[in-house]
Image (cartoon, grey):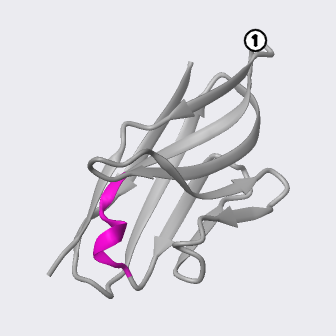
Amino acid sequence: QVRLAESGGGLVQPGGSLGLSCTVSGSIVSINSMGWDRQAPGKERELVARITSGGKSEYADSVKGRFTISRDNTQTTVWLQMTTLRPEDTAVYYCNVVGVNSYSHSFQSWGQGTQVTVSS
């Protein structure tokens, strides 16, 4: 079983900063990538940022230059540092992990989600 524990999020004013973290645990053999999706009300879930096991990161065009994804060397924790936040960044943010479990099965798991609200 793979477990994801998210923290961070909250209310911030436009132009402000906020950080999210996600720690993964469970019967995992390897992790291919860790990242963050988000879903705003009435919109489809979209990829925000992702970082691979090799350290390659990718971002949605809407957050490039404002958000930074990073992970620890054990690849059990991933962070998303968000700066210059805009009202359109308001959404529920979900951590997601892709890997292989102890049964040699590929998996993709998501966290429970954390709310980020950007408003004055």
Task: Locate residue 45 relative to residue 103 in the image: left or right.
Answer: left
Magenta span includes 38: no
Q: Which residue lies furthest to the right in this view?
A: 54
Q: How many marks?
A: 1
Using the image, determine if residue 19 lies above or below residue 100.
Answer: below
Secondary structure under the numbered disc 1 in the rendered image:
loop
Q: Nearer the viewer, residue 23 or 105?
A: 105
Pick the residue in front: 1 or 87.
87
70 is higher (above) or lower (below) than 3: below
Magenta range: 85-92
Q: Position of residue 41 (x, y in %)?
A: 26, 50
**Residue 7 shown left or right of residue 108 in the figure:** left
Q: Which amino acid lies under the numbered mark 1 shown in the image of this protein?
A: Tyr
Q: Name the residue under label 1.
A: 103
- Residue 108's quadrant in the figure? top right
Q: Which residue is drawn at 32% across and 53% down?
A: 40
Residue 75 location in percent, x, y?
70, 49
Residue 64 x, y percent position in the rendering:
59, 77
